[in-house]
């Protein structure tokens, strides 16, 4: 093959890859496919992605052991003390997932709080690698759960006749360009309504009250879709 032909092939390949990246980064990444929100008394996933942990936790108890000598509690994730048992469900959103986040149930937005990273945003390479290859626990060596910037949104509504407050925690990744909140404090949101998004790879944790007869429908490794997959009923 002549030198000019080789150069042409290389240039065309580079242009193709560049065009594909630009399309993914500025068009496909922001896709917002319609979702069919299930009827009935249930709680839906706030994010697309892979479930990385499902834990029932008592107050002041460790939730997950990230690495030797480093554990996380609910308080570390939501940045607020709790006094009642909770259920924690974490979902990892790869760069190829839809990144719009949706309300898990209907209710009123009590508050929206943003917390800066404890230093710099760490990348999520370990969790991404482990979810791709199915290596559990998915959260091993994932210090971003503790360190990275996050926005915590608390929504209060009713579930099976009980008053229920949930926390949706949007955790930014190492290359995140922003965590967006579209809802306002005091606003009423419907189940499955878009309330925000995170740009590029990220994680969304949902903290639910551990109510009587609450049946958790997901487990680590499951693939979920925001506003559509029932995670509890």
Image (spheres, grey):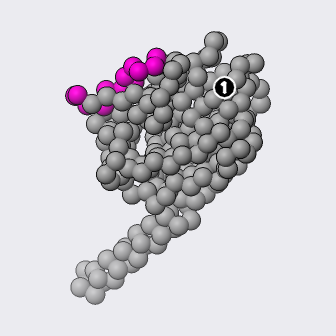
Q: Which residue is mark 1?
A: 164
Q: Is residue 23 shown above or below 103? A: below
Q: Magenta span has 152? A: no
Q: Nearer the viewer, residue 106 or 2?
A: 106
Quadrant the C terminus occupies: top right
- Point 38% across, 50% down: residue: 117
Quadrant the N terminus occupies: bottom left
Say whether residue 9 is left or right of residue 178. Answer: left
Q: Is residue 81 shown above or below 147? A: above
Q: Nearer the viewer, residue 105 or 28?
A: 105
Q: Nearer the viewer, residue 139 or 56?
A: 56
**Looking at the picture, how far across and down is residue 65, in whole percent?**
31, 26
Q: Which residues are magenta?
A: 58-69
**Looking at the picture, how far across and down is residue 136, in whole percent?**
35, 28
- Point 37% across, 22% down: residue: 62
Q: Nearer the viewer, residue 68 or 83?
A: 83
Work out whether residue 4 can be spotted: yes
Q: Residues within 10 Å of mark 1 (few under 14, many from 20)?
A: some
Q: Magenta span has 62? A: yes
Say whether residue 41 is left or right of residue 7. Answer: right
- Secondary structure beneath dot 1 equals strand
Looking at the rendering, which quadrant does residue 212 occupy?
top right
Say whether residue 218 is left or right of residue 192. Answer: left
Say whether residue 72 is left or right of residue 216. Answer: left
- Point 51% across, 20% down: residue: 83
**Looking at the picture, how far across and down is residue 225, in whole percent?**
60, 39
Work out whether residue 124 can be spotted: no
- Point 41% across, 21% down: residue: 60
């Amino acid at each position: 093959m002549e030198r000019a032909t080789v150069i042409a092939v290389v240039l065309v390949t580079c242009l193709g890859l560049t065009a594909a990246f630009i399309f993914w980064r500025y068009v496909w990444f922001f896709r917002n496919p319609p979702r069919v929100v299930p009827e009935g008394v249930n709680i839906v996933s706030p994010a697309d992605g892979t479930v990385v942990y499902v834990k029932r936790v008592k107050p002041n108890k460790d939730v997950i052991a990230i690495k030797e000598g480093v554990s996380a509690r609910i308080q570390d994730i939501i940045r607020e003390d709790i006094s009642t048992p909770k259920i924690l469900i974490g979902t990892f959103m790869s760069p190829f997932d839809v990144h719009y986040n949706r309300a898990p149930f209907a209710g009123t937005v009590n508050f929206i709080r943003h917390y800066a990273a404890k230093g710099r945003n760490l990348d999520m390479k370990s969790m991404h690698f482990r979810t791709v290859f199915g290596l559990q626990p998915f959260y091993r060596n994932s210090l971003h759960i503790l360190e990275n910037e996050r926005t915590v949104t608390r929504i209060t509504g009713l579930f099976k006749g009980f008053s229920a407050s949930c926390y949706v925690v949007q955790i930014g990744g190492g290359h995140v360009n922003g965590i967006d909140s579209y809802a306002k404090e005091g606003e009423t949101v419907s189940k499955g309504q878009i309330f925000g998004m995170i740009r590029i790879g990220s994680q969304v944790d949902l903290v639910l009250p551990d109510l009587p007869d609450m049946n958790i429908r997901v487990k680590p490794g499951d693939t979920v879709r925001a506003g559509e997959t029932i995670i509890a009923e």
